[in-house]
Amino acid sequence: MVDLRIYEEIVSGKKKYFKGADLSGAVLRGADLNSCNLSKSNLSGADLVGADLVGADLSGADLSGADLRDVKFWAADLRGSDLRGSDLRDADLTNAKLKDADLRDADLDGIELGNADL
């Protein structure tokens, strides 16, 4: 269940530290999450279409089943994250850190992986 206080802080853009937050199923389309710390957070089933996650820390985060189409993950840290079954179509993962990320059954059509650390 989404913590509404955390959701409101994300939408307002006033805070950037959300380590371990429960945002499962949250609708954050086009959200500016640039440089946010979302490590170990639960974003399973979240709708992040078109979000800006440039330089964000998503290490160890649960993004399983999330809608991540057109997300900008430039230089984001996704090490050890769970991306199983997520929709990453047309996402930009340039310079992203993906070591030990679980991408099983993820839709990777059209993704950009330039200089990504796999």
Image: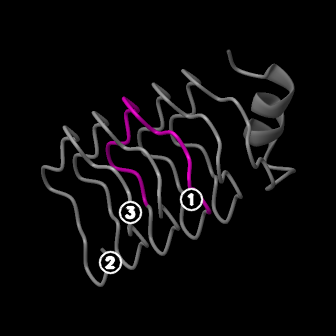
Q: Residue at x 79, y 56 (%)?
A: 16
- Horizontal side, residue 105 vs residue 45: left or right: left
Magenta: main secondary structure:
loop
The residue that mark 2 highlights is: 116
Which amino acid does the dot numbered 1 rest on?
Ser
Which of the two discs, 1 and 3, labels the residue nearer the N terminus?
A: 1
- Is the residue under label 1 in contact with that under label 2 (CB below 8 Å)? no
User: Would you place residue 116 above or below residue 81 in this image?
Assistant: below
Q: Quadrant of the N terminus?
A: top right
Element type at marker 2?
A: loop
Which amino acid does the dot numbered 3 rest on?
Asp
Farthest bottom residue? 115
Which residues lie in the magenta part? 57-72
Q: Residue at x 18, y 50 (%)?
A: 108
Element type at marker 3?
A: loop
The residue that mark 1 highlights is: 59
